[in-house]
Amino acid sequence: MWLRNCWYVIAWDHEIPEVNEAQLFTRKVLNEPILVYRTSTGEMVAMADKCCHRHAPLSAGKREGDKVRCGYHGLLFDATGQCAEVPGMDKPPAKACVKKYPLRVKNKWVFVWMGDVEKADEAMLPDNFSCDHPDWVNVPGYMHYDTPYLLIADNLLDFSHLSYVHAHTLGGSVAIALAKPKVEVIDSDGQRGVKVSRFIPDVPAPPYYTRFRDFDSNLDRWFIYDFLFPSTLLMNSGGRPVGSAPDDDSRAVVNHSCQTLTPETETSTHYFFQQSHRAILKDESVRHNMYNTLLEAFNEDRDIISAQYKNLATDALETMMPLHFDTALVRFRKMLKEAVEAEQ
Amino acid sequence: MWLRNCWYVIAWDHEIPEVNEAQLFTRKVLNEPILVYRTSTGEMVAMADKCCHRHAPLSAGKREGDKVRCGYHGLLFDATGQCAEVPGMDKPPAKACVKKYPLRVKNKWVFVWMGDVEKADEAMLPDNFSCDHPDWVNVPGYMHYDTPYLLIADNLLDFSHLSYVHAHTLGGSVAIALAKPKVEVIDSDGQRGVKVSRFIPDVPAPPYYTRFRDFDSNLDRWFIYDFLFPSTLLMNSGGRPVGSAPDDDSRAVVNHSCQTLTPETETSTHYFFQQSHRAILKDESVRHNMYNTLLEAFNEDRDIISAQYKNLATDALETMMPLHFDTALVRFRKMLKEAVEAEQ
Amino acid sequence: MWLRNCWYVIAWDHEIPEVNEAQLFTRKVLNEPILVYRTSTGEMVAMADKCCHRHAPLSAGKREGDKVRCGYHGLLFDATGQCAEVPGMDKPPAKACVKKYPLRVKNKWVFVWMGDVEKADEAMLPDNFSCDHPDWVNVPGYMHYDTPYLLIADNLLDFSHLSYVHAHTLGGSVAIALAKPKVEVIDSDGQRGVKVSRFIPDVPAPPYYTRFRDFDSNLDRWFIYDFLFPSTLLMNSGGRPVGSAPDDDSRAVVNHSCQTLTPETETSTHYFFQQSHRAILKDESVRHNMYNTLLEAFNEDRDIISAQYKNLATDALETMMPLHFDTALVRFRKMLKEAVEAEQ
């Protein structure tokens, strides 16, 4: 169940070798191996990592200027995916080419468009501003999951799990699970998905907040995020001392997080993420500290989701029991299913 | 081909953590993950290791008194498998529960009933007395097989293999294979299966017998066992010097063995076993020595059965050639097949 | 797509233990496990490595003179595959036997016939003379592939890949890819397949040629080979200084190579090979040096073919684009397909 007419993140931009490096970058998206490299103009291009001749991966070949030569029989492809040379032929057949994917780089995320090329639409790129913004500080993250991406989307669509999975990291209070989130549909400006808003009044600061400041009172915490097709979370979250004015962030912790899931295969997933904090001095000093907390928490997620998937492997998803927790994920899954069906 | 209305051993009782230990025990039986723990009354309970909500394993959660809380979204289940709390709901839905399995502990074997709960019948528990008896000494054993359980049952139903597979451990003489066993059907008192009796007169003592005593003559050996549904062997075996009266055990070696197979999946099996000897002084000193011999022999079995299974994987069972060896196993397989079909 | 009425190489003769060695040799061909051993007359025999009784591999048993006893229940098989003894039976059933395979040893290759026994025909053995000839020097080689054999046959049927895959080993010039080979059908004297002839005039000596001699001019190179059913390459190749007479080998390098592919399973392959050079003094000193170059090159092949197969695994072979390179392989695949269909 993959939506095709949408942008998927294939890499952080720092993962793609510089134009003068010999190494070729390849990653599988929706089960398609894709080659990404930079041309001499600095532009990045993406094409099928599979020679049209005998299907050897082009990434096993080598760069020749802005072109790539297959390492098996020497076919040469230009940056549009068109075959420019077949050794021993005067002129390559016109149809000799590999699929080219529309590619955009936005705030350090490298996106590829997996559907109809003529439908590629920049308005559908998510607003992942905090990935690359002078006011925000983060460490870019990547994890690989051996589970289908929708199980991870489920996890991100229901933060009640913070109270249990992340009791000692991001959570810190059962109150998160007890708070009832507001779930709204998003369907405008090229963006589709759900908005989830969860407020948790008067709870102790979670352990990792104390790295930013000391608190002498409980906090009001909030998590407000868009979860957009195909599977991208854009979140404003934080906490301020109980009694603060809603617009007074002088003693608050405020984070912005961008996270996105890209199916690698039916049963495995790429997970790109970052959680940013404000670029003030004390925060900067805890940049890697924060990243490690996030990584610890995301490993907790991966453990429970992998265990869940193992249990599911011998059972049907249909036998699950939807509960109040599941409002957002049920709605998102339904919308996505309809979008996929409309597309087919 | 699994019989469901019967008891399967899921563990030795020492494998289940004490009530004050945090660890939760889980094992798969007939492809179903099952959680086993002790309540404060000392009773042991078994339930599906799969939360009814999103199917996370409860064993990844934690104990709260006699209840277990799921580690994903915090559902709490009592010892009957009923959901006692859904965080954020006033009252859990009545149908929120996990399957509970009837459980009995008998002579250190922990049994679960995999069929209709109302048919669970203690009379069908096997008489595994020597697993826990003051007159008998043993070390409890467990092995894991990556083969279907019936191939191991076949092995246990035909001891002619002792002459070849265990020539240097339990066997010691080709005469075992040459002896013709008597095979009788058992179908009474809740027990079904076959009784196999094999007498081997006038053979040298097998190497491991000499750990109990010295012999200055050949022995008459015997193996008499019940092999009961679903797959449990209860065996009296031994040897006495040629010429001894049939009831004179003063210079004999007498063992009692309990072994049982529990399918984990279609292609893997749990094997619980012990072979006991009489609790007299010299025997006690060889307890672990005996266990190691048994383990060595059971590894020989696992090697040949795994090799057999590898060969079978590319071929049909139907092309096997039944020989006189196979009387017991053919009869047992037929009875079991009929029982499974009657059940369905 | 396996041709059955033909000879497949199962081993180099030095792989089969001597008659006085206890070890039993087993290898899978066309998904059938096959036992090979030498009898006391020095003859080699091949039979199914699968006891007819419960399908245990006979190779897990042991030799008794020219017979083999199964290690599970003791059935004894003679060198014709007939069961000579069932422990506990007066006389084995007449039908108790394992399949025997016709076997021939020719120039150190051990061949088994996988089809109808009565059709086994020595005329169909390939002329692998250089494997064992006083005028030729080589080191016998073996590799295992986790890919279907036809992808490796494709590779051997199109030497244009030498320019790219083996640029730094066997190739050394793009001219190899540019040269247009002549492809002819072979269908006589029991041999079927294609003959491929490729001449490359006036190119630098490839790096490994300089181990035989120093050259002060470019070479005319040639590769002339038969590629025969089921998958055997017999090749004369070499190079002589530009301007030499076609029959003047005094300053030439001349090699003869025999290579053959034996399917182990649908997705794995045994590869037996050697590349011989003339047995003159300087050559002899570079015997292992040559072998290492060959091994390095064949590892290059295995890398690219394994990568190709990984790409193919998620895609249909049908979407490949045949180019001029593929004349020989397309013709060979078509002939082989027709032969397999005719056989069935």
Image: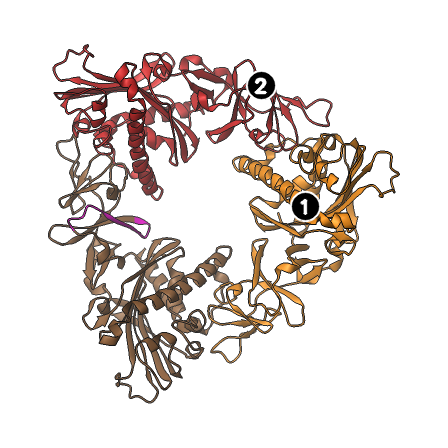
Chain colours: A red, B brown, C orange
Would residue C24 appear left or right of C115 to someone viewing this image?
A: left
Pick whichever, B254 or C174, lies toward us. C174
Q: Are marks 2 and 1 in contact (CB under 8 Å)?
A: no
Compared with residue A59, is residue C75 higher up or lower down, i.e. above or below? below
Residue type at mark 2 is Thr
Picture quarter containing residue B59?
Answer: top left
Which disc is residue B121 wearing? none
Compared with residue A95, is residue B149 higher up or lower down, i.e. above or below? below
Residue type at mark 1 is Asn
Q: Residues within 10 Å of mark 2 (few under 14, many from 20)?
A: some
Q: In terms of secondary structure, where does tag 2 sit?
A: loop
Which disc is residue A80 wearing? 2
Task: Give the residue at x 25% y 19%.
Answer: A237
The subunit carrying tag 1 is C
Which range of residues does the magenta coloring cover? B19-32
Quickly name the residue at label 1. Answer: C289
Distance from Cα at disc 2 to Cα at disc 1: 44 Å
Query: Is residue B31 in the magenta section?
Result: yes
Q: In terms of secondary structure, where does tag 1 sit?
A: helix
Compared with residue C343, is residue A97 higher up or lower down, i.e. above or below? above
